[in-house]
Each structure stands twice: as C-alpha cells, then as structure tokens.
Amino acid sequence: MKINSLLSLEKISYKPTGKTILDSVSFEIKTNEHCVLLGRNGAGKSTLVNLIYGMIWATSGTIRLFQETYGEIAIQDLRKRIGILDSSQQENSIQRKLTVKDTILTGLFHTIGYYRDPSPEEETKTLQILKDSDLLSKKDQLYNTLSSGEKKKILFLRSIVNEPDFLIMDEPCSSLDLTAREDFLGFLKEYHSKKKFTSLYITHRPEEIPDFYSKAVLLKEGKVIHFGPIEECFTEKNLEDLYDIPLQVQKIENTWSVIPKQKRTY
C-alpha cells in the first residue's frame, strides 16, 4: 500500500458458505480523495461497506485503513475514526421519540440508540453543528416527523459530528424525490467547500454523484471491472459493461447523464 493511501483493499474475497459475494476486490483511496462505488443492485456494494466497517470479515485478502491492517488492531479503534451514513438501516433503527439534537448526539455516542446523558461539551458541539448547517431551529423537533430530505441531512450531520477521518455514504439519496435529492446534494457540496475529508460514496445511480468525486470503482457481480479516474471509468463502453445495455453517456454541467440507447416499447 502506498504511504498516502487511507484505505486499501487487496484481493478481498467474501464467500460465506461457499457462495461468492465478492471476488478478489482491489482498490485504494488516498487521503482527501473522494471515490464513488458504482454497481447494480446485488453487486456486493453493501457487503463491501460491512467489510470496511468491520461488521463481517473477509474470507481472504487484506484490508488496511489508516495504515492499520484488519485483524491486527481492535476494530473498535478504527470505527471511532469512521463516519457512516447508511440510511436504509439507520432510519429504521432511530428511536421514535428522539429529537433532531438527540439523533446527532447518538453519533457522538457511537450508538444508534440514546442510552446516556451527554456531557456539556457534547451538547455544545451538537448545537454548533446544527447552527453551522442552518438547522438549529429543528433541534427540538422529533426526528421521525422530518421530511425525507431533512432526515438525510440530519443523518449526514450525525455521521460527521465526530469529525471522522473517513466518511462512508451508502445510497444516501435513496427514497428522495428529485427536489429533495438536489437539495441534499447541494448540502453535501456546501460541506465539501468548507472542509477537507475523505469519502466513499456508494450508489447505483450515476446522475446523483456529486461533481467533486474524482475516482470510481465499478463493481459487477462481486468483481471490480474498472477502477481509476472517474472520467476514464464512466465511458459508454465501461458503463455498458456494468449495466448490460446500450447506453448514451455524457456529462452535462457537472452532472452525469446515463440513458438507454434503445427506444422503449411500452
């Protein structure tokens, strides 16, 4: 692994009960880089997230994060330096009576639930991050009464409240309509303009990828079929290989447009 690599996966395979979910996956992300992991549903993207976060263990291969090798350091020590936004799990797990402020505090606690009182310093930090994001007026509102777009913003703030060294966003725009999606992406871009960070953005929709993402991993049926600069990965040939249909690919005003070439017959 190169000295400036923050995350490195080397020939990672995951084969529970003999079934191949991931097969010899390799890629790396350097400090302050932003990398997108693009793949169809069932490609193994969420499994890869669980491996990086240490929820499951690879059958073979090596994962290194922050210059530490998995299996040689307590995974809890690494998790404290990772921020994760996984709305599919987190939204369903957030306790029903938590306020916006309390939801963000659970990020400081490294828990989904609210199991202890915060220190004065933790409370101050949480209120400050809400103020900086122009969301302080929402602090006492119940999380489950927010709109879908507002929930995503709060989950994002929850993931960064500890100022993590590495941020993972797993399908952050899922369930958002076009207006809410663009609002959330603008929120994310605003954060990027103010602070340096390193991130992995998982999605199956090229059009939602923020324009500051410069690297890409294309994952198909558990294998990396392309990895490198996003402009080199997002060619018509490469994305046709990924999606198995003829595509027209272009970048319009910093947004990727990927549409089928064939006419719809319905």
Image: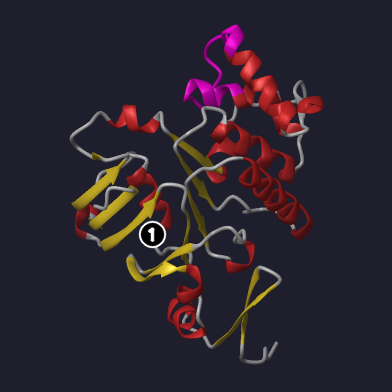
Query: What residue is drawn where x is 45% and y is 68%?
Result: 229
The residue positioned 52% from the left and 43% from the top of the image is 86
Residue situated in front as seen by the camera: 24 or 147: 24
Q: Is residue 113 above or below residue 55?
A: above
Viewport quadrant of the C terminus: bottom right
Q: Is residue 6 left or right of residue 70?
A: right
Q: Which residue is mark 1?
A: 44
Q: Amino acid at mark 1?
A: Gly
Q: Is residue 59 visible?
A: no
Label 1: element kind: loop
Q: Residue at x 62, y 26 (%)?
A: 103
| Residue 69 left/right relative to 104 | left
> Which residue is drawn at the image coordinates 58% and 58% (left, top)?
212
Mark yes or no: residue 237 visible.
yes
The verdict on residue 20 being magenta is no
Q: Position of residue 251 (x, y in %)?
A: 64, 75
* Residue 264 at x, y percent in the picture: 67, 88
Q: Which corner quadrant of the image does residue 195 belong to?
A: top right
Seen as rendered, the residue at the extreme front is 3
User: Residue 54's image quarter?
Assistant: top left
Q: Is residue 54 above or below residue 223?
A: above
Q: Position of residue 207 (x, y in %)?
A: 63, 67
Residue range in magenta is: 105-121
Asked if residue 71 is positioned above or below residue 181 in the image, the reply reads above
